[in-house]
Image (tube, rainbow, N blue to C red):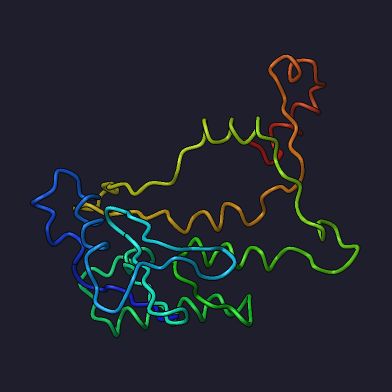
């Protein structure tokens, strides 16, 4: 499988002026005719196929025959290239790989940061027979999952003006997830209502407040 990263410009925005929504322009570009190729129908156990249409960082997946797969992505998923040439972008990938290799000898940078993070996280699950969680982590109930989705937002990119520093600065918190989840609690969570918290002793309340929680 070949992976191509677009490092300059956004070819999928070429006809953006002809569409009301940016996503429609991206879909038109991804689904345009490509001689000898077709939209990917299936690949691997994850069955990742087709084009994930994103207005800024879309992914195009094509195949020729059964064995030749090509994926086109934006390097903006990983870095803000800011006009950097391909050699600089490649160097950034190499430095990231070196940093991760200090923790995982066989690390591979997969298509996106989220895919790579999921792969690395899965390697931390104990595989030794009899080890805690070797049979898998417990699954959170549908009720609690619904509550987390309803009350937890995604990270964001925000423009701020630091004190005593002229100009605007962009803070990208995409990779902050990795640090925030490095020591996350594992196990079946328990829900503490206001009434249950009020009935606790002072020490139990302090333990609850300082424990890993949402």
Residue 163 in view (yes/no): no
Placement of 109 over or under 147, stated as above or below: below
Residue 86 at x, y percent in the picture? 27, 82
Q: Quadrant of the C terminus?
A: top right
Image quadrant in which you'd find residue 103: bottom right
Image quadrant in which you'd find residue 208: top right
Q: Is residue 18 shown left or right of residue 86?
A: left
Residue 192 at x, y percent in the picture? 72, 25
Placement of 71 over or under 152, stated as above or below: below
Residue 179 in view (yes/no): yes
Residue 99 at x, y percent in the picture? 52, 77
Q: Residue furthest bottom?
A: 87
Residue at the image position 76 percent from the left and 45 percent from the top: 187
Q: How many marks?
A: 0
Residue at the image position 19 percent from the left and 45 percent from the top: 21
Q: Quadrant of the N terminus?
A: bottom left
Residue 135 at x, y percent in the picture? 82, 58
Placement of 149 over or under 82, stated as above or below: above
Residue at the image position 80 percent from the left and 68 percent from the top: 127
Front position in the image: 129 or 45 = 45
Residue at the image position 76 percent from the left and 40 percent from the top: 188
């Amino acid at each position: 499988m070949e992976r191509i990263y677009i490092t300059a410009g956004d070819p999928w925005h070429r006809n953006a002026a002809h569409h009301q929504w940016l996503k429609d322009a991206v879909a038109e570009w991804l689904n345009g005719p490509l001689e000898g190729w077709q939209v990917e129908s299936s690949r691997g156990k994850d069955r990742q196929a087709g084009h994930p249409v994103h207005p800024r960082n879309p992914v195009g997946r094509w195949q020729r025959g059964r064995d030749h797969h090509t994926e086109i992505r934006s390097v903006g998923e990983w870095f803000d290239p800011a006009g950097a040439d391909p050699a600089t972008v490649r160097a950034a990938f190499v430095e990231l790989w070196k940093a991760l290799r200090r923790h995982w000898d066989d690390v591979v940078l997969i298509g996106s940061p989220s895919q790579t993070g999921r792969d690395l996280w899965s390697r931390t699950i104990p595989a030794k027979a009899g080890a805690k969680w070797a049979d898998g982590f417990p699954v959170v109930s549908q009720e609690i999952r619904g509550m987390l989705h309803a009350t937890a937002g995604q990270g964001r990119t925000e423009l701020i003006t630091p004190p005593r520093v002229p100009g605007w600065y962009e803070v990208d918190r995409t990779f902050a997830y990795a640090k925030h989840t490095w020591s996350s609690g594992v196990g079946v969570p328990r829900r503490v209502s206001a009434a249950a918290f009020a009935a606790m002793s002072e020490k139990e309340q302090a333990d609850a407040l300082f424990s890993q929680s949402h």
